Image (cartoon, rainbow, N blue to C red):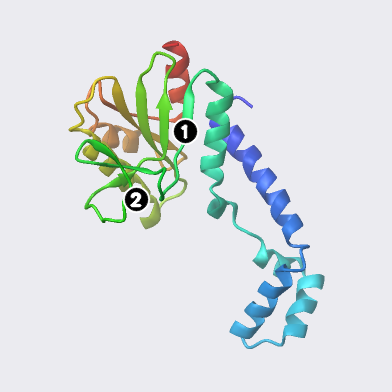
Amino acid sequence: MNTYEEYYAHTTRILQAENMQVLNDPKTLDKVDAWAERNAVPCTYARYEFYTNPAFKLMFLKDTKKQNAAEKALFHYLGDKLPTWQIHNLPQSGAQSLQLVGGLVIPTTTQVIANAKTIDIKFVSPNGAIIYATHKRTTGTGGAQKNQCADAETFLREAERNAERNVFFYAILDGDYYTPSVIARVSQLTRPGKTRVLSSDQFVEMALENA
């Protein structure tokens, strides 16, 4: 596997296989019964359909997109391609999470800070440079996709005022939503020498060139 998308496809296949195994777990029948109760369907009929109707059974298959497939694939991809880098996949909340606001990187607190954006990944290069990144894998078109792109744009705006030396902020954007015209528009928000917009593959190429 050489590209991020190949890692994503591989990760998705693994999660799908695991999810199919979960369907055979007796606990899954609890979900079938709950569905039957919500829809005023006899549980015995719902269970019969679950065992005999593959299409009905797939209704209870977990969605890999809700299992952070994009993030898991990126973490494996970067770890394999950049073994000399420190790569920290940060949680979205809790003691180890970080947020960016007004150019400052601060620990996440219970206090709501306007415009604060959660940092997805922290990189430390072999030469000590620190890169904070947001990652979006966005496909298709629509309101949800625009919201993901808007999050990346807000991240770049919040990073603009950072004055720390050897600290950088990247918006890593993957997926067919990010056409050349969309990338060009988002790139207008970058600050030379401080922020960048690039794909996962471009990030790896840049890291290897500067190693």
x then y, percent, for residue 199: 43, 30
- The residue lying toward the viewer, choosing from 61 and 183, is 61
Q: Quadrant location of the C terminus?
A: top left
C-alpha distance separating marks 1 and 2: 27 Å
Work out whether 115 lies above or below 29. above
* Secondary element at image label 2: helix
- The residue lying toward the viewer, choosing from 39 and 71, is 71
Residue pointed to by mark 1: 88
Query: Residue 44 is drawn in which quadrant?
Result: bottom right
x then y, percent, for residue 128: 38, 17
Task: Tell me if 182 is positioned left or right of 28 in this view.
Answer: left
x then y, percent, for residue 153: 28, 41
* Secondary element at image label 1: strand
Looking at the rendered image, the disc whose residue lies closer to the viewer, 1 or 2, is 1
Work out whether 72 lies above or below 197. below
Amino acid found under the numbered disc labelled 1: His
Work out whether 170 lies above or below 45. above
Query: Residue 171 is drawn in which quadrant?
Result: top left
Question: Which class describes the residues within 10 Å of circle 2: few (<14), some (14-19), or many (20+)?
Answer: few
Residue pointed to by mark 2: 146
Task: Tell me if 61 is positioned left or right of 171 in this view.
Answer: right
Q: Quadrant location of the N terminus?
A: top right
- The residue lying toward the viewer, choosing from 171 and 30, is 30
